[in-house]
Amino acid sequence: MKVFNSLTRKPEELKPLEGNVIRMYTCGPTVYNFAHIGNFRAYAFEDVLRRVIQFCGMGVKQVMNLTDVDDKTIRNANQQGKALDNYTRTYKDAFFADLKALNIQSAEVYPAATDHIPEMIALVEKLMEKGVAYKSDDGSVYFNVRKFPGYGALAHIDFDNQRTGARCASDEYDKENVGDFALWKAWEESDGPVGWDSPWGRGRPGWHIECSAMAMKYLGESFDLHTGGIDNLFPHHENEIAQAEAATGAKFVNTWMHCAHLKVNGEKMSKSAGNFFTLRDLIEKGYTGREIRYVLVNAHYRTGLNFAFSALEDARKSLERIDRAVDALIERIDPSEEAPAFVAKALDDFTSAVQDDLNIPKAFAALFDLVRETNASGTKSQAVLDAFRRMDEVLGVIFFGKKEKEDIPEEIANLLKLRAEARAAKNWAESDRLRDEIATAGWLVKDSKEGQTCTKK
Ligand code: AMP
Ligand code: ZN
């Protein structure tokens, strides 16, 4: 599979450095609030990426950190008078629930920054020993960007035209303010109870060192792939490279991938701009996780995606079309029927699309070719159903009868049970009444030879 490497700015073959497993680090959420669907564009892109890696026959070890200590988490926890871990717990739990709603596969490891302070301190100590870091008057420790010759390689910074000597205490800044960045921040009044003892006094890690330390702990000094949204490229990822490579002398990461932003009216969706929707906002408006996932993944990851409710409406219609074709196929499957010629073609088109820098819109086109041919031919072939399943290993949006049953809430399951009993007793009036009750709760019951199937309306 080929992917676009932000470091070399070229498409390149993605191959594991060792064995058959891609080691991948994805910058996770800052758990100071509910993640918005712009954040989930990044996580959905990374989910599709890990699914394509597996689709191509490789294994994956994905590490996604939880930033549970930084400028923003401390500010909010202290404003609300809560202990930091108590404050971030709510948003960690919400994050995992949201991942599930979007059918995003679990990463192999979810390290939290606050569980890795000793590793971060050890890394800062190493950078001090190497002479690339220094302690400032206030007790903070900074990385001296002038001491690391490779600085700016990822963001392609024209270093000679930049201001030098400036120091940046905050975690986020732009390219105009490139300068020494904080590795360890000395405790301040506003930090309140948050702080850890270190060789430089009480304080806390900078955001960038968190990721370098956790990435190397779980994936080694050199690994295959590092991803995030495009806003992470500078300064966060540039600084991660500087910290890791200055400490180890080894190449930190082979391939860097970044997704473009989800926008609203042409502007980046963000907390600070106030133009955001959380997943919960959209679910409350009646959209499903599956419809939201469809919209997020069905755009090329390197092109900007403008969020619109009309896209969610279109997603609903497209998913209904897929569901109808797949449901009808499941109903008429005949194991003795041979594979029609169009299956191989659709799968080939699908495979080339996903292997070409994750061209998911093209992959969906191959899926819809399969839908069309399935309907037109009335095929009963198991191979066609297998092809839908194979494509869904990457897309993660198709409901196959069985999967749906698992998602049915308990109260609906109870009503279905009562309805099955009513039907067995030939009590059709009760059966119809229960069907209506289930419909009012948002579920559609269909009867077939195998019994009832129930789908979300
Ligand atoms: P944060 O919690 O701000 O550190 O962001 C978590 C992830 O979401 C990072 O990979 C960001 O690059 C990404 N991200 C933030 N806003 C957007 C957006 N509007 N579109 C796509 N990705 C985003
Ligand atoms: Zn990070």
Image (spheres, rainbow, N blue to C red):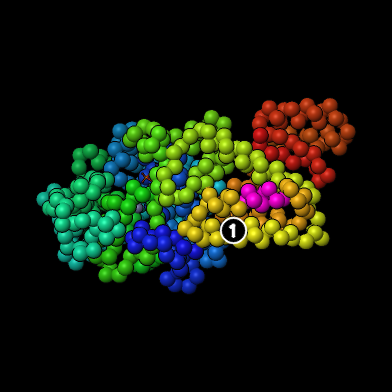
Magenta span: predominant SS is helix
Residue 139 left/right relative to 348: left
Which residue is rendered at x = 42% and y = 65% of the image?
A: 12
Question: Hey, which residue is sitting farthest left in the picture?
Answer: 137
Crowding near the residue tagged with mark 1, few <14, some 14–19, many ≥20 C-alpha atoms within 10 Å: some
Q: Report whether the residue tagged 1 is closer than 8 Å to ligand 1.
A: no
Taking depth in this image into account, of 67 and 456 the one nearest to the observer is 456
Q: Residue at x 51, y 33 (%)?
A: 309
Q: Position of residue 430 (x, y in %)?
A: 82, 28
Placement of 292 over or under 368, stated as above or below: above
Q: What residue would you read off at disc 1?
A: 349
**Residue 373 magenta:** yes
Identity of the residue drawn at 74% across and 41% down: 453
Q: Residue furthest right?
A: 426
Q: Is residue 378 left or right of residue 426?
A: left
Give yes or no for residue 155 being in the magenta stretch. Answer: no
- Residue sitting farthest toward the bottom: 19
**Quarter residue 153 falls in:** bottom left
Tell me, yes or no, if residue 98 can be seen here: yes
Tell me residue 244's x, y (percent).
29, 63
Which quadrant of the figure contains the C terminus? top right
| Magenta residues (range) | 367-374
x and y, in percent, of residue 391 in the image: 61, 55
Q: Relative to 72, does residue 300 appear above or below in the rendering?
A: below
**Residue 117: image location, x then y, percent:** 31, 55
Along the horizontal axis of the image, is 93 left or right of 379?
left
Identified by mark 1, the residue type is: Asp
Q: Nearer the viewer, residue 322 or 227?
A: 322
Where in the image, quadrant-wise, is ligand 1 located? Answer: top left
